[in-house]
Image (tube, helix red, strand yellow):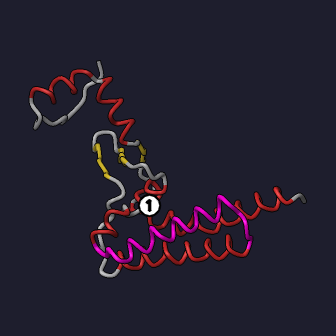
Amino acid sequence: MSPAQKDAALVADCLALVAPAEAAFRSRWRLGTLQRIDPDLHQLLLEQIDLYDVALLTVSDHREVRKQSEAMVRGWRAACARLEAPLQPDDAYLVGYDPHKGLRVVISDQAASVARVQNSKPGERVMIVTPDEVARMMTAWSIVADTKALFPNAEVVSVTPA
């Protein structure tokens, strides 16, 4: 295996190591929530993210890459633990529900949020959309966009197919 292949394999291993811990946090909370609750831990986590990113990008020392990856896992776990005690409400996503269609819609940039919502009600239909997708849908649905422009507090209560 060439040095470049070894570096790539190490980076892949480290990404796989950190991903579950990061997803556990990001599927529930935003970094801004941690900053509001514990500014010191937030700052430490940001510093660790920088150290981890530099280690992955430079791959100058394999031990350092592994060390920073393990520290990143500990950082994400510490952030989760801090927001779980006392428990802070999830704020990484918004959830809406259409009882007529039995569909729960999750608005989030984090795909892991869908699993979190699906696990709360097994068997329920759940769809994820990003904020950008919501913007495009509202733009395409001109009657809603036009109505909201005139009446900002108007609500979509039901929809009848044309």
Whether residue 138 is situated above or below residue 109 in the rendered picture: above
Residue at 15%, 36% in the rendered image: 155
Query: Image quarter for residue 122?
Result: bottom left
Per the rendered image, the range of residues in magenta is 37-62
Q: Which residue is mark 1?
A: 27
Whether residue 121 is situated above or below residue 34 in the rendered picture: above
Q: Is 63 in front, or is 110?
A: 63
Q: Is 138 in front, or is 100?
A: 138
Q: Is 69 in front, or is 87?
A: 69
Q: Is residue 55 left or right of residue 131?
A: right
Whether residue 4 is situated above or below residue 138 in the rendered picture: below
Assign a secondary structure to mark 1.
Answer: loop
Residue at 44%, 60% in the rendered image: 27
- Amino acid type at circle 1 is Ser
Residue at 32%, 33% in the rendered image: 135
| Quadrant where the N terminus is found in the figure | bottom right
